[in-house]
Image: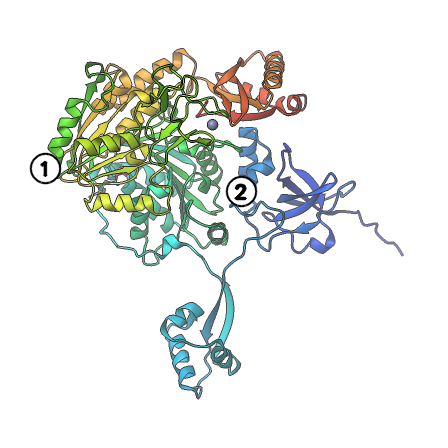
């Protein structure tokens, strides 16, 4: 008898191990795990002599020779679908970051530990059977009637109506009247809040025109990116809502990214209002969720139970299938860029994700990033504009106040003080922006000139008067403020400059009858504090709100008619090529807070540089002119959008070693390329941070390809870098401090 020889093939898993390894590794799936292992699950795999957590990326039949077996499958259900795998892979390549670390960053927090799961809330649910008749007990009769009404009821819901002991329920199950099951329960406090349903407005002519361009793209189900450029209040959010409605009608899903959920409760409320009443399930991923809640929401999304996901940066990884649209609101916001670890930009990954899913992208902004507007100008992205405010509400009148004419050391010009007084008399609200928290940026001995620096970061310590502390705003180092100067023993150690705390105190002296409040990271650290301030503002219990850029965002106070900017130069003089862009955008945003209601608004911007185009253009509400000036400056210096940047930062405790490693790396990179400018090494603007010396090498090239080619040498070069020196790679850096 002839017996065919069976070729030996086995199930092979490629695994992204959560470790700094630049590619996936292959493992054998033993027969015992064949039935359970699925793409998107976490695994325990051997790595050298230890075990590591990895993510199952692909499963194929193949030759198992030399492969180690998977030790354990850690999940009962996949955390992401196979569709996400090429997205993770491309993201890892683009940012030159280990694939396993990319997936780990993408997955909800609380999962990364060694095999521990997050406890899932389960709840007993009772369903009525069609068994006729009645039980004998009165309580049992009542329970049965309650469950029969809707057909099924969760235990907690049931107990809201009747205090039923578990034994009585078991009895009903045994008698065959009820069936008991256990279900996962979604814990999302956001969704437990009541919803008010607002009327749906008819689109304005401009909104209709914009939607007229988006709808065909949605209908054809191909990747189509659009910039939606419109001032605050021009009706962008309404466009998002309408476009999402179309997507839902197609049976597809929507992803909405916002800079920070806590600062955008009004946007979330509008989405919930529009899609309430079971029209769509919304998951809100926000930083207030516990690990368990986040995990629940993630699982619900992965199971396909959610139609709309709203979240900050990390929501770009939400495992939504059938993606029809991705909205990135305030696309210019720097908070979309992750500042450590896997340094991705959520807007750019949103574009990549939509491209792979055949979805429409709406990038909304009043002040688009220069790079985004450039893409729109050059036709890579569609350009949609909403030119005016809805209902013709006028834009506020903006004036620049030249501080060089004010007496030195006065934080409030006569002009701004006078306007505030008038506003108070009329009973209208004012906002004051000062982008610096604490009482004063530093303490200074006026006898010998001594200042106080952070021993870890070598920058000046900020004086916080309320807490009697000198604090480092980078590493949170704290020391008590000295009574006497430690150097000259003099008694004249005085706060210099102004922070929000000091401004609040001085305003209280100047306007003793005004109700003044402060909104910054110090006053909003407590949970719910930010929300409370916003509510007090809405109820008009505050006349003057002082704050950092937090006050510029997300809310819509109808009583605010005056906005003052204490010092526009603080962002303008930042050592970064984007400082003009940031200043323009912040000023435009804060100015947009004035006159949102019936009354028109007024904005006063105090500055030592009243001629600077970032300020003059902000005062004129002229984005186009700002863009022209800014882009000309960028072109001369080959900065983005004309050049692409990668910032390499070397850091370590031993300054000499760091410097040596940086020299070596810069030279090696220089030798490996003729197409990329290798700039540096040079000390980072924050040359010492948390005790570590920091040196940077900036790579610059007119296109991305040569940068990619050069970065491919990095893993090899990295191995030759001295122990004790860390290297971070930041592709498209946003913050180069
Ligand atoms: P943006 O997102 O650009 O700031 P919004 O969509 O929030 O603008 O619109 C600003 C205000 O105008 C909101 O109060 C909104 O309810 C209202 N609004 C938007 N579109 C319309 C419309 N077509 N008709 C009437 N009111 C509208
Ligand atoms: Zn410090």
Task: Give residue 84's mark.
Answer: 2
Q: Disc 1 versus disc 2: distance between alpha carbons?
A: 56 Å
Queried on whether the Cβ of the residue with tag 1 lies below 8 angstroms from ligand 1, the answer reads no
Q: Quadrant of the N terminus?
A: bottom right
Asked whether 56 or 716 is in front, the reply is: 716
Label 1 sits on residue: 426
Residue 695 image-quadrant placement: top right
Quarter where residue 24 is shown:
top right
| Residue 470 is at least partly visible in this image | yes
Name the residue located 49 percent from the left edge and 49 percent from the top edge.
291
Q: Would residue 478 appear left or right of 387 to someone viewing this image?
A: right
- Location of residue 157 with respect to 14 vertically, above or below: below
Residue 650: horizontal and vertical position, in percent? 57, 22
Quadrant including the C terminus: top left
For disc 1, the neighbor class at 10 Å (few under 14, some 14 to 19, many from 20) is few
Ligand 1 quarter of the rendering: top left
Relative side of 47 to 236, left or right = right
Residue 307 image position (x, y, % from top left): 41, 51
Q: Nearer the viewer, mark 1 or mark 2?
A: 1
Mark sitting earlier along the chain (1/2): 2
Q: Name above or below for residue 310 compared with residue 403.
A: below
Callout 2: helix, strand or loop?
A: helix
The residue at 43%/29% (across/down) is 472
**Front position in the image: 482 or 156:** 482
Q: Quadrant of residue 392?
A: top left
Image coordinates for residue 303, horizontal then vertical, percent? 50, 54
Which SS class for mark 1?
loop
């Amino acid at each position: 008898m002839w017996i065919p020889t069976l070729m030996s093939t086995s199930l092979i898993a490629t695994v992204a191990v959560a470790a700094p390894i630049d590619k996936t590794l292959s493992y054998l799936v033993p027969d015992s795990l064949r039935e359970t292992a699925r793409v998107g699950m976490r695994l325990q795999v051997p790595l050298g002599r230890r075990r590591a957590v990895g993510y199952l990326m692909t499963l194929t039949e193949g030759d198992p020779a030399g492969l180690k077996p998977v030790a354990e499958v850690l999940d009962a259900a996949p955390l992401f679908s196979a569709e996400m795998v090429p997205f993770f892979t491309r993201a890892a390549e683009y940012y030159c970051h280990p694939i396993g670390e990319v997936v780990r960053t993408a997955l909800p927090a609380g999962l990364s530990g060694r095999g521990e799961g997050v406890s899932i809330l389960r709840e007993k649910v009772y369903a009525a059977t069609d068994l006729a008749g009645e039980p004998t007990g009165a309580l049992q009769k009542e329970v049965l009637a309650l469950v029969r009404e809707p057909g099924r009821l969760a235990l907690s819901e049931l107990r809201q109506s009747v205090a039923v002991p578990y034994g009585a329920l078991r009895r009903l199950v045994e008698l065959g009247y009820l069936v008991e099951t256990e279900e996962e329960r979604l814990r999302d406090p956001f969704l437990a809040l009541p919803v008010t349903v607002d009327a749906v407005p008819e689109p304005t002519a401009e909104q209709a025109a914009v939607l007229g361009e988006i709808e065909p793209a949605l209908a054809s189900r191909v990747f189509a990116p659009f910039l939606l450029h419109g001032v605050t209040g021009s009706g962008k959010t309404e466009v998002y809502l309408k476009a999402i409605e179309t997507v839902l009608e197609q049976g597809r899903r929507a992803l909405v990214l916002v800079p920070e959920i806590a600062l955008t409760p009004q946007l979330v409320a509008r989405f919930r209002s529009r899609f309430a009443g079971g029209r769509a399930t919304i998951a809100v991923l926000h930083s207030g969720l516990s690990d368990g809640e986040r995990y629940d929401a993630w699982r619900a999304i992965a199971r396909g139970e959610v139609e709309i996901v709203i979240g900050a940066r990390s929501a770009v990884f939400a495992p939504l299938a059938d993606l029809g649209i991705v909205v990135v609101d305030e696309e210019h916001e720097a908070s979309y860029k992750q500042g450590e670890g896997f340094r991705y930009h959520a807007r750019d990954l949103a574009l990549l994700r939509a491209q792979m899913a055949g979805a429409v992208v709406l990038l909304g902004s009043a002040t688009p990033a220069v790079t985004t507007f450039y893409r729109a100008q050059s036709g890579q992205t569609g350009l949609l504009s909403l030119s005016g405010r809805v209902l013709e509400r006028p834009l506020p009148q903006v004036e620049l106040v030249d501080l060089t004419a004010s007496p030195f050391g006065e934080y409030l010009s006569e002009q701004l003080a006078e306007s505030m007084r008038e506003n108070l008399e009329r009973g209208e609200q004012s906002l004051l922006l000062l982008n610096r928290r604490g009482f004063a940026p530093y303490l200074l001995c006026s006898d010998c000139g001594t200042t106080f620096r952070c021993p870890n970061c070598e920058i000046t310590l900020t004086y916080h008067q309320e807490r009697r502390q000198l604090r480092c705003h980078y590493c949170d180092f704290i020391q008590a403020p000295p009574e006497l100067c430690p150097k000259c023993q003099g008694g004249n150690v005085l706060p210099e400059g102004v922070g929000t705390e000091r401004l609040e105190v001085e305003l209280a002296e100047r306007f003793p009858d005004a109700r003044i409040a402060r909104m910054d990271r110090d006053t909003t650290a407590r949970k719910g504090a930010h929300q409370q301030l916003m509510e007090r503002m809405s109820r008009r219990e505050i006349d003057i709100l002082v704050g950092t850029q937090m006050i510029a965002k997300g809310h819509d106070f109808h009583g605010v008619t005056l906005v003052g900017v204490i010092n526009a130069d603080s962002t303008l003089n930042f050592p970064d090529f984007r400082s003009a862009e940031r200043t323009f955008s912040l000023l435009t945003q804060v100015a947009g807070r004035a006159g949102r209601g019936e009354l028109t608004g007024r904005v006063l911007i105090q500055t030592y540089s009243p001629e600077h185009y970032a300020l003059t253009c902000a005062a004129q509400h002229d984005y186009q002119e700002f863009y022209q000036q800014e882009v000309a400056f960028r072109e001369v210096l080959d900065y983005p959008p004309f050049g692409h940047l990668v910032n390499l930062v070397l850091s370590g405790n031993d300054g000499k070693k760091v410097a040596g490693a940086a020299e070596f790396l810069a030279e090696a990179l220089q030798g490996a390329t003729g197409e990329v400018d290798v700039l540096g090494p040079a000390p980072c603007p924050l040359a010492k941070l948390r005790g570590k010396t920091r040196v940077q090498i900036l790579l610059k090239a007119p296109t991305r390809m040569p940068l990619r080619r050069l970065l491919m040498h990095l893993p090899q070069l990295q191995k030759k870098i001295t122990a004790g020196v860390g290297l971070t790679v930041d592709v498209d850096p946003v913050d180069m401090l």
